[in-house]
Image: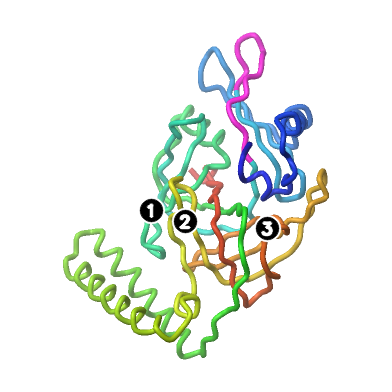
Amino acid sequence: MHSYLKAVGFSNIKTREELEQILSMVMTQPTEKYVTSERKDSVIVELKKDFSERFGVAVHGEYDEKGFFHLEHYYPYFKGQIVSLREEIAINKRVDTDAYTGMCDDLRIGISLIFYLQNAIDYIDCVEKNRWNVRALPVVLTGLATEGKILLGTTKDSTTERNLISENKQRTQLIAEAKKGNQEAIDSLTIDDIDLYAMVSRRIRYEDVYSIVESTFIPYGSESDNYTVIGNIIEAKKLQNEFTSEYIYNIVVECNDITLEICINEKDLMGTPEPGRRFKGNIWLQGTVAFAEQ
């Protein structure tokens, strides 16, 4: 049973028979169908069924030469509408399933960002037609969460906000220079980290950690595309699963200057999401790459 099914409104699926009913609906009544031919003796296919205007369940598999469909894997998805970044993307095939992950270096968070690729068929098509090359492409990021909580926002005056924007811009430039091997930039970043550690150690004795740390975007657990995020809520609205009638929150979050949409079941969210507050939770990061711009 996929652990993130409840994020898109299937929290009551307990048995294999109930899961098979959902997967059968996806395969017999798909909203979208993507087909490509990667090998001569089989056809790779991905079927998606929307259970709301923004989310659903997808099955990935292949038709053999006799026309039989073989299911490889399935996954819940949430369709984003906001371009989160534009970076050079490297695509890698997962070892355990016939699925793909995207990876890019975003200087705003200072780590390699890894996400589950939602439009893998588009990538396979690019490779088949020899149109794929690593270059900067728009990426729409979304996150599925199985639990989360709402935190109060932090208050900043206009001067503090301007200083933070300037500091973040300067740090991004230093990281870019450090990646090129600039020793002065490396030393400067090291000193900044030491100063930051000293500041946090001093303030943590008198303040709550969430008043010091406004947002975070850090890897979580053993899966490469899972992250712990704390971000400022820009917008929040409710969606409903048309099959189960469960309500799902669609929360637009700004985290480390990256904007993404998070999908979480109303039952799994502690608190009420509103603009100005913050979301904290662990997410499975998904992404759609605009391969059409190749």
* Position in image of residue 84 (x %, y %): 53, 59
For marks 1 and 3 on the same chain, the one whose residue lies earlier in the sequence: 1
Q: Is residue 2 above or below residue 191?
A: above
For marks 2 and 1 on the same chain, the one whose residue lies earlier in the sequence: 2
Amino acid at circle 3: Asp
Q: Nearer the viewer, residue 142 or 243?
A: 243
> Does the residue at mark 3 contact the one at mark 2 (Cβ under 8 Å)?
no
Name the residue that disc number 3 marks.
Answer: 268
2 vs 1, front mark: 1
What secondary structure is found at the residue carrying circle 3?
helix
Assess disc 1: are there few (<14), some (14-19) or many (≥20) residues with their C-alpha within 10 Å of its C-alpha.
few
Alpha carbon separation for disc pair 2 and 1? 14 Å
Amino acid at circle 2: Arg
Name the residue that disc number 2 marks.
Answer: 86
Q: Is residue 69 above or below residue 127?
A: above
User: At 58% across and 54% down in the image, what residue appears?
Assistant: 143
Which disc number belongs to residue 61?
none
Q: Is residue 292 above or below residue 140?
A: above
1 vs 3, front mark: 3
Alpha carbon separation for disc pair 3 and 2? 31 Å
Amino acid at circle 1: Ser
Q: Is residue 119 above or below residue 219?
A: above
What secondary structure is found at the residue carrying circle 1?
strand
User: At 69% across and 36% down in the image, what residue appears?
Assistant: 48
Assess disc 2: are there few (<14), some (14-19) or many (≥20) residues with their C-alpha within 10 Å of its C-alpha.
some
Q: Where are the magenta residues, as a range?
A: 62-75
Name the residue that disc number 1 marks.
Answer: 112
Q: Quadrant of the N terminus?
A: top right
